[in-house]
Structures are given as structure tokens and as C-alpha cells.
């Protein structure tokens, strides 16, 4: 069955340093998409980055990059030069299949706290 | 603000009462999704619409839950005979899905339901 695992309930990082948030997934589909969302205390889910299963290059969006290791079924999020505003919950999610339907399966999240 | 709008932001209700939430998606988005998020967990898919058609419902959506999107614009989610286990954040998201354009899902800030 499809599943997303985030093994880090909480993480600390010093401001301006880089941090890696772990995500592993399980699927039997060949075609799938992986997402990272940020959820601040206000509640909305903010899209950060997307990686398709057939994408050969790791996705990057500004300070966010996705370390995609297909054979290991991992899709870790790397945040460079952490800022105080990065403190939030971070969720890894997966969409199965070629359709762009947004039936996403989410992990349980990692709470990131950036220390000044 | 042209993002996804959800009302109310908070709702406290007594067990057994009916509640209705509203979601206004981004205006040109033809797909609309409902998710439920309990404390300490990631969101779980409930249902989604393409225009006015409800295309998929999760097994999480019991008979007490009903969602509509009558004119393919805003959507409502009704819970009848609420139970304490219904206490959660209800998130709405929307996206474009067409032959010419596809986007990631944009989420609203959610409606937090507390059943007492």
C-alpha cells in the first residue's frame, strides 16, 4: 500500500545553516509525484517543491531542493540558509499515477524550529 | 486576496448537531479537494470535484458527510450528527486540470472544527 514516512517529529536548526528533512515513500506505481508542503501556524498548506518520478534532475526552488533517490525511495527536502520564518510543520506527500488528480497521501510531518 | 477561501475559520458545535463549511476556490480552478487533518497528523484525502462532478470519495467519508459543488464554483461540506471524532481541521484545495494547463494544489487556511 502507498505510504509516506517522515521519521523526524521535530528538528532544530541554527539560523543561516542548512537542514535536511527526511521522507521515504512506498509505492508500486512507476509513475508518481512527490511534494513538500509547509504548514505555518496559520494552517494553510504552502506548496514548496515537486519531483516527478521520471524527472532525472533533482528539483530546486530557490532555497529548497529535493534530494531524490529513486532506488532508495527517498525524497528528502533540503533547506539552505535557514531563516526564522522557516519555522513551521513540513509535510512530504505523494501522488500516484499519471493523472494530475491531487489525491495526495501525506506523511505525519516534521516540525522545524529555526534558532536565532 | 485571490487565494482559496474557507469559512468559517473556526467552529465549535455540540455533539449531534449538523455543521456546514464553505470553500471558495481560486476562480479559474476547475478541481476542488477536501482534506481532513487531525492533530499531529498530515492531511487525509476526503473527496474531490472536477467542476460540479464529484469524482472520488474516500472511505473516510462516512454517510454523515456530504459534499457538493453545485455550480462548479464554491463547495460545501456538511457533517450531520457530529461526533467528537469529527474534531479536526478541514482543508480545501483547488487546482487547474485541463489539456492545456495543470497546476499544483493551492490550499486554504482550513476550518477548525471542535465538537464538544
Image (cartoon, coloured by chain):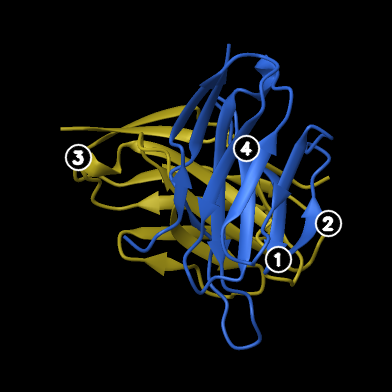
Chain colours: A yellow, B blue
Disc 3: which residue: A15
Q: CA distance from mark 1 to mark 2?
A: 31 Å
Could you say where residue A52 lies in the image, as x and y percent from the top left?
61, 69
Q: Residues within 10 Å of mark 3 (few under 14, many from 20)?
A: some
Upstream in sequence: badge 4 or badge 1:
4
Q: CA distance from mark 3 to mark 2?
A: 39 Å
Which of the chains bears the disc numbered 4? B
Q: Residues within 10 Å of mark 1 (few under 14, many from 20)?
A: some
**Residue at (56% x, 58% y) in the render:** B74
Q: Secondary structure at mark 1?
A: loop
Q: Residue A80 or A61: which is nearer the viewer?
A: A61
The C terminus of chain B lies in quadrant: top right
Q: Is residue A64 left or right of residue A72?
A: left
Q: Residue B63 or A77: which is nearer the viewer?
A: B63
Q: Secondary structure at mark 3?
A: loop
Disc 4: which residue: B36
Q: Are marks 3 and 4 on the same chain?
A: no
Q: CA distance from mark 2 to mark 4?
A: 25 Å
**Residue at (61% x, 37% y) in the render:** B20
Q: Is residue B95 left or right of residue A112?
A: right
Residue A28: image tag: 2
Q: Residue furthest top?
A: B116
Residue B52: image tag: 1
Q: Are marks 1 and 3 on the same chain?
A: no
Q: CA distance from mark 4 to mark 1?
A: 21 Å
Q: Residue A2 or B67: which is nearer the viewer?
A: B67
Q: Are marks 4 and 1 on the same chain?
A: yes
Amino acid at each position: 500500500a502507498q505510504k509516506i514516512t517522515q521519521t523526524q517529529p521535530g528538528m532544530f536548526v541554527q539560523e543561516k545553516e542548512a537542514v535536511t528533512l527526511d521522507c521515504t515513500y512506498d509505492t508500486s506505481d512507476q509513475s508518481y509525484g512527490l511534494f513538500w508542503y509547509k504548514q505555518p501556524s496559520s494552517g494553510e498548506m504552502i506548496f514548496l517543491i515537486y519531483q516527478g518520478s521520471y524527472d532525472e534532475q533533482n528539483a530546486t526552488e530557490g532555497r529548497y531542493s529535493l534530494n531524490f533517490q529513486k532506488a532508495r525511495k527517498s525524497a528528502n527536502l533540503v533547506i539552505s540558509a535557514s531563516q526564522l520564518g522557516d519555522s513551521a510543520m513540513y509535510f512530504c506527500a505523494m501522488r500516484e499515477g499519471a493523472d494530475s488528480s491531487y489525491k495526495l497521501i501525506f506523511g505525519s510531518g516534521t516540525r522545524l524550529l529555526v534558532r536565532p | 486576496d485571490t487565494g482559496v477561501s474557507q469559512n468559517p475559520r473556526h467552529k465549535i458545535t455540540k455533539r449531534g448537531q449538523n455543521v456546514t463549511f464553505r470553500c471558495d476556490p481560486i476562480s479559474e480552478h476547475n478541481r476542488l479537494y477536501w482534506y481532513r487533518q487531525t492533530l499531529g497528523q498530515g492531511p487525509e484525502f476526503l473527496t474531490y470535484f472536477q467542476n460540479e462532478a464529484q469524482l472520488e470519495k474516500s472511505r473516510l467519508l462516512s454517510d454523515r458527510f456530504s459534499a457538493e459543488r453545485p455550480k462548479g464554483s464554491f463547495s460545501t461540506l456538511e457533517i450531520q450528527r457530529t461526533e467528537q471524532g469529527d474534531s479536526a481541521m478541514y482543508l480545501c484545495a483547488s487546482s487547474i486540470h485541463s489539456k492545456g494547463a495543470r497546476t499544483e494544489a493551492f490550499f486554504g487556511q482550513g476550518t477548525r472544527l471542535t465538537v464538544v
